[in-house]
Each structure stands twice: as structure tokens, then as C-alpha cells.
Amino acid sequence: MGMSQEEFEEHAAKAKTLPETTTNENLLILYGLYKQATVGPVNTSRPGMFNMRDRAKWDAWKAVEGKSKDEAMSDYITKVKQLKEEAAASA
């Protein structure tokens, strides 16, 4: 089943070209999956409540901590494809 590292990196590059209109929610999902795929489970403590941006990113990562590296990579690729298709459809 394993996704290739190359395919993952290719989609990570594509994610950087997503339109400005991509929702924060979707960007956070991608962030969490990316961190899970590259770093593994959350390895830092949750940022304080005054640091909303980092806290949201941390929460997104924490939300997927049960996934294996392969699962996270696969979900990430699927999500990037979905967002690229939505962007193309609305362009």
C-alpha cells in the first residue's frame, strides 16, 4: 500500500501552489498530516492560548497522531489532490 516518498514530496510541492482561497481549515489539515508523515506524533507541548496560529497548527497535528507515517502520507496526497481539483473547478 505504501506511498512513495517521491510522490509525497511532489504533492508537498503542489500544496505550496494552492490558491490563496484555500481555507484555513484545509491548510491546517494538510499541516497536521504533513507533520505526522515527516516527524511522527506530536513531540512538543501545546502552545499557549495567546498563540492562536501555532495552537491551531498543533491541534491539527495532534488530531492525526494515531496515523502511521504511510497513512498520513496517503491522506496528505489525497487531500492535496482534492484541493487542487476544487481549485481547478472554481478557476
Image: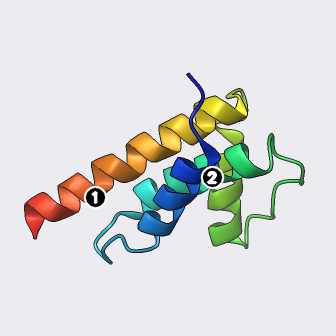
Q: Is residue 81 above or below residue 89?
A: above
Q: Which mark is residue 84?
A: 1
> Which residue lies at the image location 52% right of the left edge and 53% below the top edge?
30
Relative depth, front residue between 13 and 44: 13
Q: Is residue 72 visible?
A: yes
Q: Residues within 10 Å of mark 1 (few under 14, many from 20)?
A: some
Q: In the image, 37: left or right of 87? A: right
Figure quadrant of the C terminus: bottom left
Tell me which label, 1 or 2, sits earlier in the chain.
2
Under tag 1, what secondary structure? helix
* Disc ID at residue 34: 2
Name the residue nearer the viewer: 1 or 62. 1
**Residue placed at 50% from the left, 37% from the top?**
75
As drawn, the label of residue 64 is none
- Residue drawn where x is 58% and y is 52% of the image: 6
Report x, y in % for residue 14: 42, 65
Q: In this view, which residue lies farthest toward the bottom? A: 20
Residue 28 in view in this figure: no
Image coordinates for residue 1, horizontal then vertical, percent: 55, 21
Could you tell me residue 37's position as x and y percent? 69, 44
User: In the rendered view, does 26 fall on the left or right side of 84?
Assistant: right
Local SS, label 2: helix
Residue name at image x 74 percent, y 64 percent: 49
Callout 2 crowding tier (Cα within 10 Å): few <14, some 14–19, many ≥20: many
Q: Amino acid at mark 2?
A: Tyr
Q: CA distance from mark 1 to mark 2?
A: 16 Å
Q: Position of residue 51 (x, y in %)?
A: 72, 72
